Image (tube, rainbow, N blue to C red):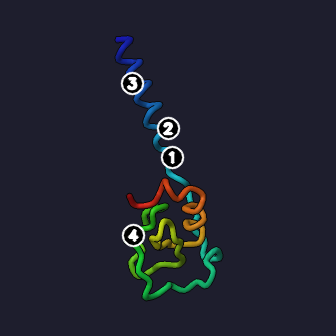
Amino acid sequence: MKSLIILTALLSISLLSCAKETPQVKHASHMDSSGKNLENIQVVNDEDPICHMKTAGSIKDTAVYKNKTYGFCSVSCKGEFKKSPERYAQK
C-alpha cells in the first residue's frame, strides 16, 4: 500500500513539472507590429512552435535560426522563441 502511495505521488510530481515547461503566452493584438499577415514567406513550420497555433496564412512575424525561417502568430511568440530557440527549433 505504501509503495502505491509513493508511486502515485511521484507520478503526480512528474506530471506537474512537465506541465510547467510549456510557456504561457498571452496573445494581444496590440503587440503585433503591423497587424497584417505576412505574405509569400517560406517558413519551415506550419504551426507556431510556441503556442502551436496553425500559422498557414496568418503569419504575423518571423525569425531566422540556423538558416531556417520560422513563422509566428504574434510578436510575443517570436519573443519567447528568441529567448531559447534551440528548445523550439525543428530538429
Q: What residue type is labelled 3?
A: Thr
The secondary structure type at the circle numbered 3 is: helix
Closest to the camera, between mark 1 and mark 4, is 4
Give the Cα separation between the discs numbered 3 and 2: 14 Å
Looking at the image, tell me whether mark 2 or mark 4 is earlier in sequence order.
2
**Residue at numbered disc 4:** 45
Left of 22 or right of it: where is 11? left
**Residue at numbered disc 3:** 8
Q: Which amino acid does label 2 sit on?
A: Ser
**Residue at numbered disc 2:** 17
Q: Which mark is residue 49?
A: none
Looking at the image, which is closer to me, 69 or 26? 69
Closest to the camera, between mark 3 and mark 1, is 1
**Residue at numbered disc 1:** 21
Tag 3–tag 2 contact (CB < 8 Å): no
Task: Looking at this view, name the residue that lies furthest to the front.
Answer: 67
Residue 62 image offset from top left, x and y in percent: 52, 75
Graded by Cα atoms within 10 Å as few (under 14), some (14 to 19) or many (20 or more), the crowding at tag 4 reads some
